[in-house]
Amino acid sequence: MKFSIAIAAGLAGSFFVAQAASAAGGFEDQMGRCLQQFANTHDAAQVMLECNAADGKLSGCKVVDNSAAGKGFDKAAMCIAEKLPMGAKSGAVKVPFRFPGGA
């Protein structure tokens, strides 16, 4: 069974500000680090991952759609997925990311 999980990545700009004030290791910190490392936050993109969810985590993720190929958003999404909290979800899941740009 596939579940669709929406990720509101539109707050990426605020994560950069919050990054300095947050404790290391949180999801917001991970998102900010991944975007800074792999993608240009001034560009917009949409990325769809397909992953396996178990024990509150994602594994075996692969990119199934990327609107901005070659701009690093696929790598940023994979990086963010490593820390994405999944709760009790299990099985195959599709994880959409929307990077609005302009940050």
Image (cartoon, rainbow, N blue to C red):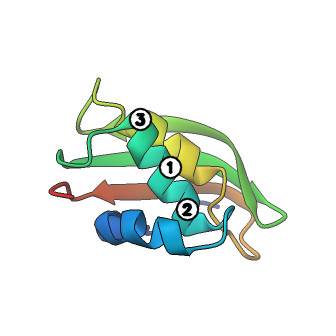
Can residue 5 be seen from the camera position used here? no
Residue 29 is marked as 2
Left or right of 53 in this view: 36: left
In the displayed structure, 21 sits above or below 90; it is below
Q: Amino acid at mark 1?
A: Arg
Query: Could you tell me residue 57's position as x and y percent?
Result: 75, 59
Label 1 – label 2 distance at C-alpha: 6 Å
Query: Could you tell me residue 56's position as x and y percent?
Result: 77, 67
Badge 2: how crowded within 10 Å, few (<14), some, or many (20+)?
Answer: many
Query: Could you tell me residue 88's position as x and y percent?
Result: 76, 76
Please give the name of the residue rendered at 38% of the width and 69% of the height, measured from the top-left corner.
17
Label 1 sits on a secondary structure element that is helix
Q: Nearest the camera: 59 or 64?
A: 59
For marks 2 and 3, the one nearer the N-term is 2
In the displayed structure, 32 sits above or below 37; it is below
Please give the name of the residue rendered at 54% of the width and 42% of the height, measured from the top-left corner.
78
Q: Are marks 1 and 2 in contact (CB under 8 Å)?
A: yes
- Which residue position holds label 1? 33
In the displayed structure, 52 sits above or below 56; it is above
Label 2 – label 3 distance at C-alpha: 14 Å
Q: Nearest the camera: 76 or 96?
A: 76
- Which residue position holds label 3? 38
